[in-house]
Amino acid sequence: MDWMTVFQNSFTQMIGVSAIIYCLAALGLNIQFGYAGLLNFGQAGFAAIGAYAIAVTVATLGLPLLLALALAIVGAVIFALILGIPTLRLRADYLAIVTIAAAEIIRQVARSVSLNDYLGGSDGITGKYAADWYALNPFPAGIDTALIRFSKNDLWVVLNGWVVVAIVVLLTWLLMRSPWGRVLKSIREDEDAVRSLGKNVYLYKMQALTLGGVIGAFAGVIFAVAAQSVQPDNYSTTLTFFAYAVLILGGAARVFGPVVGAMIFWFLLVFVGQALNNAVKAGYISTDILRTDQVGQVQFMLVGVGLMALMIFRPQGIFGDKKELALDER
Amino acid sequence: MSDSTPSSRVQAATVKAVLESVNPTPGAPKPDPIFVGDDITRSFGGLVAVNVEHVEVQRGSITALIGPNGAGKTTFFNVITGFDPPNTGVWSFQGSSLAGTPAYKVAREGMVRTFQLTKVLNKLTVLENMRLGAQGQTGEGLFKALIPGLWRKQEQEITERALGMLDQFNLIHLKDEFAGALSGGQRKLLEMARAMMSNPTMLMLDEPMAGVNPALTQSLLEHIKELRESGITIFFVEHDMDMVRDISDWVIVMAQGSIIAEGPPNVVMRNTAVIDAYLGAHHDVALTESGESLTQPSVPLTQSEES
Ligand SMILES: Nc1ncnc2c1ncn2[C@@H]1O[C@H](COP(=O)(O)OP(=O)(O)O)[C@@H](O)[C@H]1O
Ligand SMILES: [Mg+2]
């Protein structure tokens, strides 16, 4: 059994492109759900907007990447306004319902046959993504060490991706220690108390939804650039729920929660999958019990059980404060 | 404490004297009303919770709103502070109409309320709760929040003020505790102190004494009187008749949604309509010793709704 490869793959994915994408999606949710208490179940929709902004602008129309980034941001802001204007005055669960539906609408529109010529239907758009930007890659080659292995392109994506993560973490940290963050955390606790003190709760919720959505769009941008393609079905509700898993694993309302959550989530997911695969191949697990083509499902089952165990034994997540959580029960 | 206009600096004695001359009838006009409401109704299904034809609150006074449980006092507070939409009604504060104004703007206008079921922010510390109360904070803007240099000095000033206020309310030793860890009475105090952070012109308290440790009530009463001295109008709902008699300049009595009596405390508490309203709602509670005065109840009129 090749433990070296198992570990190498696991560590690579721990800091790889997927971890970055889910980390960003969860960083957005952290502002919305973690700090402001907004149940956005449509983060996949925001990511899809970011991804398709890149795909259509750069790959299809051949326009510059910076313009595409601007469009990704504008698109996410508009989407947030469309979701927020009718729902943010209502009870919290309305936002949840509307966002989950809206994200599915985006995916269905993206894969619709009638827009095939523009958005590529269910195949999505594959093409030259950000060639200029890849040309800036200073790395002469990929790396292949005992712990990690990246291709030349992946190395460039991963480096830039973590820089984006670092900027978002810094932004979150700055905001959450400011009076703005104080208002947001207070809204999560009790909106009416905040209103009674003269704060425009609706405006703050809209800002949180928008900011978290723009961060989610960046997850899509990185996804598209790294994969050099977009496929609509990558932006299904699974993306949103994984991002929530990452957030809760790391600890909601903690600046570094999504970062640690994403790294642990991807390490575990890959490690469990690869270890099972190897064990089956090496004959440690009989194919009567588990075949390699079933590993994928079992992998998610085991990670799910692990998450459940975490919620039972450490409900506040890795970084959370148990004392703070206990206040809910009063 | 507040940016009081000259006319709001009415001394306690003067307020009492001025209100002496007011005819003690429901909806009585006041010489210098800070709040005027007309035809305010709110019903829930078939139940008319509030039906107030006319009401005025004298500027600079401590005005109590009393009435049996379910009389509609809290609903009335909710309506005039923008937390609950009325079926009908207009009302104005310091001359400007507030009907249809969202709750946060009502608070900015200077009408700041607390809640019967205390709303402290459990996962924020006591000090952070207090800081939230301050108005006009530069750092509460999304973009300015990113540059601490723009708001750090103001935050410092707010903190100073918050610490001073916590000291007055006997909460200073708890400043770094989570608000959720406080006792019911301490939360009431915190909520009131936090409301004071926003420099209200009229402070509206919904059952401020419910659950407060009796050892603290006296100092809290003194504190409320001091607020009035500094020009703040106090409009409060209370069940504790001792407190009402002790500090209020004027008492408004609600029953079944309507104002049934008004007047100085000693007058109102002798009013038979008031006694009937209470007895009607609480047949089993002996309100008075002789049947003609409500001023010395041996039992609190109702229990607090909070545990
Ligand atoms: N949200 C609501 N829905 C239905 N009925 C309500 C609601 N709020 C208050 N009520 C009813 O309105 C009446 C007045 O209640 P409330 O204003 O809380 O009285 P008070 O504060 O004087 O005790 C009560 O009969 C109460 O049951
Ligand atoms: Mg009430």
Image: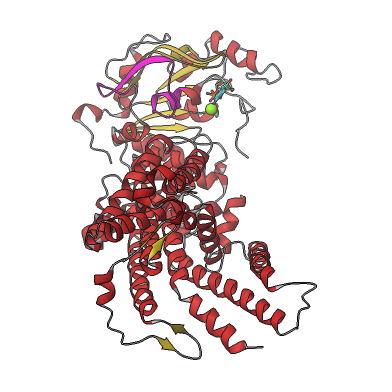
Pick the residue in front: A140 or A114. Answer: A114
The answer to whether residue B166 of the structure is visible from this angle is: no
**In the picture, which quadrant includes the N terminus of chain A?**
bottom right
Where in the figure is residue B295, as x and y percent of width and height?
55, 21
Q: Which residue lies furthest to the left in this view?
A: B6
Where in the figure is residue A63, as x and y percent of width and height?
22, 59
Marks counted in the figure total 0
Q: Which residue lies furthest to the right in this view?
A: A288
Where in the figure is residue A145, as x and y percent of width and height?
46, 90
Pick the residue in front: A277 or A268. Answer: A277
The answer to whether residue A250 of the structure is visible from this angle is: yes
**Whether residue A20 is situated above or below residue B237 in the rendered picture:** below
Pick the residue in front: A292 or A41. Answer: A292
Give the residue drawn at x 62%, y 27%.
Answer: B302
Colour treatment of the image: secondary structure
Pick the residue in front: B61 or A238. Answer: A238
**Whether residue A208 is situated above or below residue A170 in the rendered picture:** above
Read off the magenta span. Answer: B76-98
Residue B81 in magenta?
A: yes
User: Which quarter of the picture shows residue A64?
Assistant: bottom left
Where in the figure is residue A180, as x and y percent of width and height?
33, 53
Residue B182 in magenta?
A: no
User: Which quarter of the picture shows residue A288?
Assistant: bottom right
Figure quadrant, ligand 1: top right
**Whether residue A181 is situated above or below residue B258 in the rendered picture:** below
